[in-house]
Image: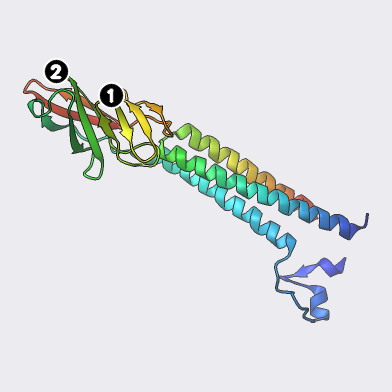
Amino acid sequence: MRASERSGRASSALVLYAVILVAFEIFLLTVAVEAFQADDERLAWATATVSVVVAGSAAVLHRVLRR
Amino acid sequence: MTDHVEQGRQPIWRRDFPYEAAGEDEITRREFARYLVAGAGVMAAGNVGLAIWTQLRSINTGEPRAIVALADVPIGDTHLFRYPTDRDPAVLLRVADREAVAFSQKCTHLGCVVFYQPDEDRWHCPCHEGNFDTRTGQAVSGPPTRPLGRIDLEIRDDDTIWALGAHP
């Protein structure tokens, strides 16, 4: 497989992954709003933690695939 | 490899060969992925902000104050009032001679106004058919999952019903 083909596939995979990730982040945001309304601090922090971990891992993956 | 070395924002090859191509201003797949990852980061930051706000906000539980005279509310009847602030509709139900319960009138599903149904003995939300237990305010059927906001009451010696505080 040529390098340009591999690079194209990698960026396509990254875009697909990022779209799924953003959808998941939107879901997490709705959970956080629900936790805010219910004054559920535990759920709010758990949601924030998952959200940060997911976004952070996406940023790392983005850096790795960009090389 | 010098093709990819950037000085500032412009690659070196572009300085040497300054040509323009059709569609050059269109967004690339890589840029789109970068924007998506950045968007995810912004939403993660929003999530953290919401968590901090949830942790730090002070919920007004209300000051103790007289609501209504016991004699003005027959047994099985309700009395509407506002508590803890004038923007918070609440409802009181006298369930026995010297026993009353009070809840926020905001349905915990989407905030519609709940009312008492004597024939069914329950709090009912007409918007989405949500129902709550009369005495505890727990959700019993329909879309709501959280109980109604409860208001602590006390019937004092002068036969006045007092609200002591709200639990959102």
B125 or B151: nearer the viewer: B125
Instruction: Please give left or right for residue A66 compared with residue B166 in the image.
Output: right
Residue found at x 86% / y 68%:
B2
Number of residues whose C-alpha sits closer than 10 Å to that of mark 1, classed few (under 14), some (14–19) or many (20 or more): some
Q: Are marks 2 and 1 on the same chain?
A: yes
Q: Secondary structure at mark 1?
A: loop
Q: Secondary structure at mark 2?
A: loop
Q: Amino acid at mark 1?
A: Asp
Number of residues whose C-alpha sits closer than 10 Å to that of mark 2, classed few (under 14), some (14–19) or many (20 or more): few
Counting labels gives: 2
Quarter placement of the N terminus of chain B: bottom right
B3 or A65: nearer the viewer: A65
Vertical arrangement, residue B107 with respect to residue A55, above or below: above
Question: Tags 2 and 1 in contact by the CB under 8 Å rule?
Answer: no
B89 or B96: nearer the viewer: B96
Residue B100 seen: yes
> Mark 1 — residue?
B121
Residue found at x 72% / y 51%:
A16
Indicate which label's residue lies in the foreground, 2 or 1.
Answer: 1
Vertical arrangement, residue A61 with respect to residue B131, above or below: below
Which chain does the numbered disc 1 sit on?
B
Residue B104 at x, y = what percent?
Answer: 28, 35
Instruction: State the mark number for residue B97.
Output: 2
Alpha-carbon span between mark 2 and mark 1: 17 Å
